[in-house]
């Protein structure tokens, strides 16, 4: 089977599984496009060599997903390219690399935050936000990926492959963004979620980071931000603000990122308290965990309300269109037996979802897709817990 055929089949399976979700997501997405006045830019992106914005594999996967869901290919293509610009993510990533964990193998965590859009209202959107679902993707070499995605997209918010490589992504609040005048092609081309997904075809964190940097050198992220790649021994942090790229290798140490640029610190947007507070709070929590960090410790970080439940907290409960936490994942990486690596996923507010049996799931990378309850692929836990009140 060729790469294109495998990717197309990947898409068909996902499209058939979430067909109703995709139909509704597209309906509301196009309402948002019209409200934002993006119709002309959408036309340019989808008609002028759209395959240049995505890898060939993702391009074919979207084609298969459109067929499986019974929707238009160009409509779904535009959704995958444009959605990150309409709803940028504000997230918190934290990790204990190598010997910094209790087991001596990396633990990697992420809270995925997102702002709402008043046009995103419907059966498959909840409290103005897209539904988060568990995603399963097959790679062309027979490996696979488990992670969290927005229903109907091929990119990843965070995920883990069966080689034991994990990825997280963050939006970066750069002062450059407001000053930069971008063409339509530049504005919608370098999507973090797609780069993260493609990079998990690699067998080590180093290989994944090299792949991502090569992509970014050719075409930077559409908006400034970060990618973090981890395996059992080490973590690579990649920060990108248009033409500038910063890279850090972390071995046997704890570290974190919010939406606050650290390697490219001079490019931060001034006065963003949320980014600054979440970064320093995670740094403080991690500092006492070196050599003894466990998944339970990371769940506690994910649920943290020390600085409040609003924008400066780690578990964020923003009201209405304010940015708030939509899902979380904690990954235990196994260097000796990578397929024994485990991803723990909570859909909805972490302070609720981690504590409720139907709000989270633990998936070992040696499990079969059929062993995962269908409700997690459809996002039912997200609907139940995304608007939950804070549990302190």
Image: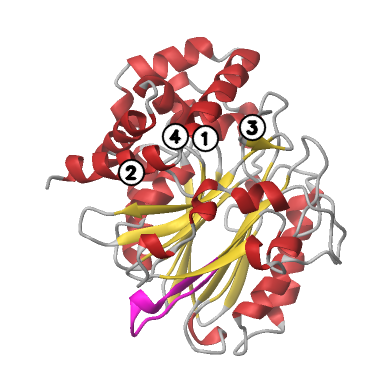
Q: Distance between the residues labelled 3 and 2?
A: 22 Å
In magenta stretch: residue 342: yes
Q: Which residue, given by chain and number where applicable, does mark 4 sit on?
A: 19
First of labels 4, 2 by sequence position: 2
Q: Distance between the residues labelled 4 and 3?
A: 13 Å
Pick the residue in front: 186 or 151. Answer: 151
Can residue 202 be seen at all in this image of the molecule? Answer: yes
Q: Give the range drawn in magenta.
A: 330-344
Q: Do the residues labelled 3 and 1 touch (CB within 8 Å)?
A: no
Task: Give the quarter of the image for residue 47.
Answer: top left
Q: Are marks 4 and 2 in contact (CB under 8 Å)?
A: no
First of labels 2, 1 by sequence position: 2
Q: Which residue, given by chain and number where applicable, does mark 3 sit on?
A: 123
Residue 61 horizontal/vertical position (percent) = 30, 38
Q: How far apart are marks 4 and 2 (CA)?
A: 10 Å
Residue at 62% from the left image edge and 66% from the top image edge: 256
Q: Which residue, given by chain and number where applicable, does mark 2 sit on?
A: 13
First of labels 3, 2 by sequence position: 2
Q: Distance between the residues labelled 4 and 1?
A: 5 Å
Q: Height in image: 306 above or below 29? A: below
Q: Which residue, given by chain and number where applicable, does mark 1 sit on?
A: 21
Helix, strand or loop at mark 1: helix
Q: Do the residues labelled 4 and 1 touch (CB within 8 Å)?
A: yes
Q: Height in image: 143 above or below 385? A: below
Q: How crowded is mark 3: few (under 14 residues within 10 Å), some or many (20 or more)?
A: few
Give the left or right position of residue 107, taking residue 179 as reference. Answer: left
Residue at 29% from the left image edge and 34% from the top image edge: 64
Give the left or right position of residue 135, taking residue 141 as reference. Answer: right
Q: How far apart are marks 2 and 1 (CA)?
A: 14 Å
Residue 221 horizontal/vertical position (percent) = 47, 39
Outermost top residue = 40
């Amino acid at each position: 089977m060729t790469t294109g055929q495998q990717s197309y089949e990947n898409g068909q399976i996902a499209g058939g599984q979430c067909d109703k979700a995709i139909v509704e997501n597209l309906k509301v997405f196009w309402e948002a496009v019209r409200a934002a006045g993006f119709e002309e830019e959408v036309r340019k992106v989808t008609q002028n060599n759209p395959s240049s914005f995505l890898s060939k594999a993702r391009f074919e996967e979207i084609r298969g997903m459109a067929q499986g869901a019974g929707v238009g290919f160009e409509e779904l293509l535009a959704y995958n390219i444009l959605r990150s610009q309409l709803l940028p993510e504000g997230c918190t990533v934290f990790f204990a690399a190598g010997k910094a964990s209790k087991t001596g193998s990396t633990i990697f965590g992420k809270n995925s935050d997102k702002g709402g859009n008043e046009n995103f209202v419907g059966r498959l959107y909840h409290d103005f936000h897209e539904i988060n679902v568990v995603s399963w993707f097959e790679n062309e070499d027979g490996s696979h990926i488990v992670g969290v995605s927005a229903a109907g997209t091929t990119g990843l918010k965070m995920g883990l492959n069966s080689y034991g490589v994990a990825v997280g992504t963050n939006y970066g609040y750069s002062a450059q963004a407001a000053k930069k005048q971008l063409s339509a092609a530049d504005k919608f081309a370098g999507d973090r979620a797609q780069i993260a997904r493609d990079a998990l075809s690699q067998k080590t964190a180093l290989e994944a980071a090299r792949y991502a940097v090569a992509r970014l050198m050719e075409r930077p992220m559409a908006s400034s931000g970060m990618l973090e790649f981890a395996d059992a021994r080490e973590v690579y942090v990649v920060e990108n603000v248009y033409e500038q790229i910063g890279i850090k290798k972390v071995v046997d140490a704890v570290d974190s990122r919010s939406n606050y640029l650290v390697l490219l610190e001079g490019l931060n947007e001034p006065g963003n308290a949320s980014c600054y507070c979440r970064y320093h709070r995670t740094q403080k929590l991690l500092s006492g965990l070196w050599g003894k960090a466990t998944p339970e410790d990371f769940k506690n970080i994910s649920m943290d309300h020390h600085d409040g439940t609003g924008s400066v907290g780690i578990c964020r409960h923003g009201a209405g269109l304010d940015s708030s936490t939509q899902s979380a994942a904690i990954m235990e990486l196994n260097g000796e037996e990578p397929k024994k690596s485990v991803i723990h996923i909570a859909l909805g507010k972490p302070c609720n979802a981690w504590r409720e049996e139907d709000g989270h799931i633990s998936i070992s990378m040696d499990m079969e897709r059929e062993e995962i309850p269908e409700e997690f692929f459809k996002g039912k836990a997200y609907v139940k817990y995304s608007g939950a009140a804070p549990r302190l």
